[in-house]
Amino acid sequence: MTRRTILPIAVLVLLGGLAWFQYSRRFQEYRSDQFLMDTLISITVYGKNQELLRTAVAAAYAEMRRIAELADGFPQPGTAAWRSSDICRINDQAGKAPVPVDDDTVAMLLQAQKYSRLSHGAFDVTVGPLMELWGFGGNNPHLPSPEQIRAALTLVNSEDMIVNKQDHTVFLRKAGMKLDLGAVAKGYATEKAASVLAQYGIDKALIDAGGNIRVIGRNSRNSPWKIGIKDPRTSDAIVAILPLVDTSAVTSADYYRAFEEQGKRYHHILDPRTGYSATHTISATVITKDAGLADILSTVFFVLPAEKSLELAATLPGVELFLVTADSRIRHSPTLSGTIEITRSDAYRYDEGR
Amino acid sequence: MRFGTRRMVFLSLLISLGTALHLVEALLPLPLPFPGVKLGLANIVTLLALHLFGLREGMTVSLMRVLLGSLLSGMFLSPGFLLGMSGAIFSTLLMSALLKHSSCFSMIGISMAGAAAHNSGQLLAASLLLQSTALLLYLPLLLLAGIPSGIFTGYLLNSLLQHHKKSGILSDFFEQNSFNDRRN
Amino acid sequence: MTKGDKLLLAVLLLFSTLSTGLLYSRFSSFSRSSSALQAVISVHGDVVRTVSLPVATRTALTVQGRVGPSIVEIEGSRVRMREAPCPGRICINQGWVGQPGQSIVCMPGEILIRIEGASPLDGVTR
């Protein structure tokens, strides 16, 4: 080896290595926002091929739109949107006949029924008549009379929903029963979108479906995605920060569609057992891989008392829970200690490890 | 074959010494909040090779040291390896150029310049890798950090060379070695 | 140390301290990414306006949403929805936003105003 050969070789190795690294690290970002399911859905993906990113995100939105149409609860009867909505057709045939539905509708309803049973009715997809009574679907929610609530409660029971897995049919036993997939469809669609992205080989993505977060892989800096949990009482504040990898975080909170009447505050998460807004908790965040499950469980844990929620969460593998209770306490699953960063321990009571 | 046997053996010794120092140094992170700040002990060996032989041998020792060190620590072709490689090339070239004017500079100055060049080369590679010029903001800090480590290693080398002058271990070896070289 | 050494030391010291001072006075934080603050306004998923923040003078922009024109007001580094034809007026009631990652959403108009810039968070669950 002479001086003339060793230096050029070293420089070549160095430049080649640099070029290779630069190429392999050249991640591009592609982001797209769409209004779907009464909310704003943002999908951000990272990859080397911009064309592939666009195609994958378009496919993910198409899948979400398909689920949204199946589960849409409020189109005008008789329209195309109404006919394509499994939920509308099931509600229409309540007490009359089983309705043939899509596989995804079957999957959503079976999962919902499973957690209705597990929570002893703290969560129920047949809550439709109550939601309608309160007017949470429209612009003008109001407080119904106790008699009205009592009457609507007789129509709320998941056990009267017959899901036939073999025939792909769903039947509501009582006339007047109504499904409401408000706590199910968004999460289910989010998870579907995540699996579409994964099928396209996307390994870095963030789906934000109106605050339901699903992440794939790590963020662009190759660290866990840093996801804040909204402070339920101070606008623009973050109560805690979660580092997330390949998982989802969904929050149910009392600050949406809330109104005051006769000096009391009411919001859209109803306890299907009482017919009134649930009051134990003001914000419940569930961290688990399946965004559909996280969506359902965040409602379950919002409705149940904190102690029961934490107990139940501990029995579910891969499920972590973060609560802000009505008495301004922060509670969370013990497994979150060490990873979660509490940023508002000044505003809420927080005893670590409890 | 242009390498005399003695010279080859001595170069090999320098390479293994450099590799060992490289690895030892990797085990001794300095208690500073900045990554990339190192003592630069392995630089002593490169400078010694440059001083005793020349640019070709100095470059060989320094590149082989980076290569072997990265292979042994499992960092081969990692970003750290590429940074080290770039730093090594920069500093070896600069130190070799300065050695030609060794009347102006002592080992301390040359080693200081080497440390500065090493850090600049590393940073340049890093900012190319990350495609970010923001990293160059780091340069003044790294240059500053290179000053004491350069002085330290230069001082060590100075005392080494003084010891060698007194004991004559190396010169003995060198006269024979150059003889070998001429014979080839 | 020779004269050359001392000269070299002086040059290095001078260069690094001077440039440190210069850089730190211009960039208050090392970790801050270079991506600048901007307000991005989109309708139905398509970006219609991008405004670099802060703006020198208070500006009102008319944005054609799905249910009619809305007026977006920008003042300094903050943005709000001043007027909108939507019934809920949630977007107006939300007030000013100005932190990276924050957004104002008008659901009926399908208008999204997002503050972009280096945010410490990748997302917020709410």
Image: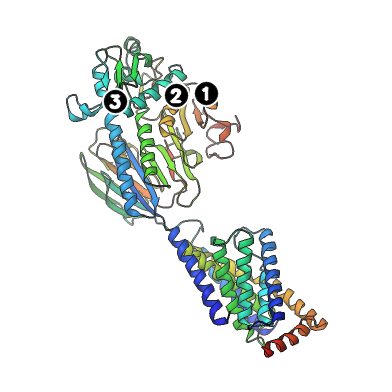
- Residues marked 1 and 3, same chain: yes
Q: Residue at x 47, y 47 (%)?
A: A218
- SS under mark 3: loop
Which residue is drawn at the image coordinates 62% and 70% (left, top)? B64
Q: Crowdedness of circle 2 by 10 Å Cα count: few (<14), some, many (20+)? A: many
Which circle's residue, 3 or 2, is located before the other in the chain? 3
Foreground pick, A244 / B32: A244
Q: Distance of mark 1 from mark 2, alpha carbons? A: 10 Å
Look at the image and tell me in which quarter the C terminus of chain B lies. Answer: bottom right
Q: Chain of mark 3?
A: A
- For the residue marked with disc 3, what is the amino acid? Gly
* Residue B172 screen position, x and y as percent: 78, 84
- Label 2: which residue? A300
In the image, residue B76 above or below residue A109:
below
Instruction: Look at the image and tell me whether residue C26 can be seen.
Output: no
Residue under disc 1 on the same chain as residue under disc 2: yes
Read off the residue under disc 1.
A312
Amino acid bearing label 2? Val
Residue that label 3 marks? A137
Q: Residue A327, image x and y in percent?
A: 52, 25
The location of residue A290, given as percent across then percent down, is 44, 34
- Answer yes or no: do the residues labelled 1 and 3 have beta carbons within 8 Å? no
Mark 3 neighbour density, 10 Å: few (under 14) some (14–19) many (20 or more): some
Mark drawn on residue A133: none
Q: Quadrant of the N terminus of chain B?
A: bottom right
Disc 1 or 2, which lies upstream in sequence?
2
Proximity of marks 1 and 2: CB atoms separated by less than 8 Å: yes
> Disc 3 to disc 2, how far (Cα)?
20 Å
Q: Nearer the viewer, mark 1 or mark 3?
A: 1
Report, in whole angstroms, how far the alpha carbon at label 1 lies from the one at label 3: 30 Å
Q: Nearer the viewer, residue A350 or A179?
A: A179
